[in-house]
Image: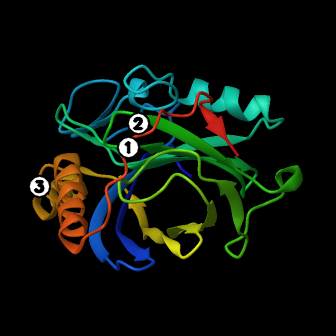
Amino acid sequence: MKPWPEHIRGATTHARRGGIKNAFRYGVDYVLIDPDSTKTPLLFSRNRFNLASVLDRHHGGPVGNGRGKLWAADILADAGLKPDRLLLLTQPRFLTYVFNPVSFWLAFCGDDLVAVIAEVNNTFGDRHSYLCHLDGFAPISPGDRIEADKIFHVSPFQDVGGTYQFNFDVSQDRIAIRIAHFNGEEGLVATLSGTRAPLNNRRLLGAMARRPFGPLRTIALIYWQALRLKIKGAPYKNRPTPPEKEVSQ
């Protein structure tokens, strides 16, 4: 990846498994950044106010008090990995508001993706991250399925239980991520996919025109889907105590 940030114009899909079906597909805009780079277009900034921005304190560590790349590097080092490159795939902050259901720290050795930290946030202000890798940090291919126990409350209409299966397909032109949750007959399948292109002012303005208010739109759509599930009769699950550990795998 070049030092200049990239724009991922893509889509996310969610399909609920089990007795109460629900599915949706929405367009999304992500950025892929090298946290060490200072090269940005005029309307995008790192660690300061702009139309769109990414702030270190919003990623890596406690919500609102993160350490950004330093945190991700420490997590990987504790697991035995010192990658050549560490990139962040996330939805940017719009003006002063940010909310990311999930962001991804992508760790590369050479050109190979060898680990991913999936940084998951819920609407209750909690965060938990899942460290995904193969044995020995072997290169991750699109067909690899990386499993992790679900221990974090995300949707109030899903139990905390079962397992996740993560699939990562990261090429020079495109990113496709699939997360499947299996809990008996229940669960869901979520995807994020889109094309990679250099981030510039025209693309930022286009994204704001297509999907106004960025993360505000995201949170509104989450509550809309929650209302649909409630109308369909899905039982509401109270928020349990978040896991004590920050990262699991």
Tell me: 184 left or right of 5.
Answer: right
> Measured from the top left, where is residue 77 in percent x and y?
77, 30
Tell me: 44 left or right of 166.
Answer: left
Q: State the separation of the CA atoms marked 3 and 2.
A: 25 Å
Classify 106 as above or below 157. Answer: above
Q: Residue at x 34, y 48 (%)?
A: 91
The tag earlier along the polypeptide, 3 or 2, is 2
- Pick the front one: 228 or 119: 228
For discs 3 and 2, the disc positioned in front in the rendered view? 3
> Measured from the top left, where is residue 200 in percent x and y?
28, 52
Residue that label 1 marks:
122
Q: State the separation of the CA atoms marked 3 and 1.
A: 22 Å
Amino acid at the residue labelled 3: Pro
The tag earlier along the polypeptide, 2 or 1, is 2
Dot 1: what SS? loop
Q: State the separation of the CA atoms marked 2 and 1.
A: 31 Å
Q: Residue at x 52, y 51 (%)?
A: 160
Crowd class of label 1 (few under 14; some 14 to 19; many from 20; radius 10 Å): some
- Pick the front one: 240 or 42: 240
Q: How many marks?
A: 3
Do callouts 3 and 1 mark residues in contact (Cβ within 8 Å)?
no
Residue that label 3 marks:
212
Residue that label 2 marks:
39
Q: How is the image coloured?
A: rainbow
Amino acid at the residue labelled 1: Asn
Tell me: 114 left or right of 236.
Answer: right
Dot 2: what SS? loop
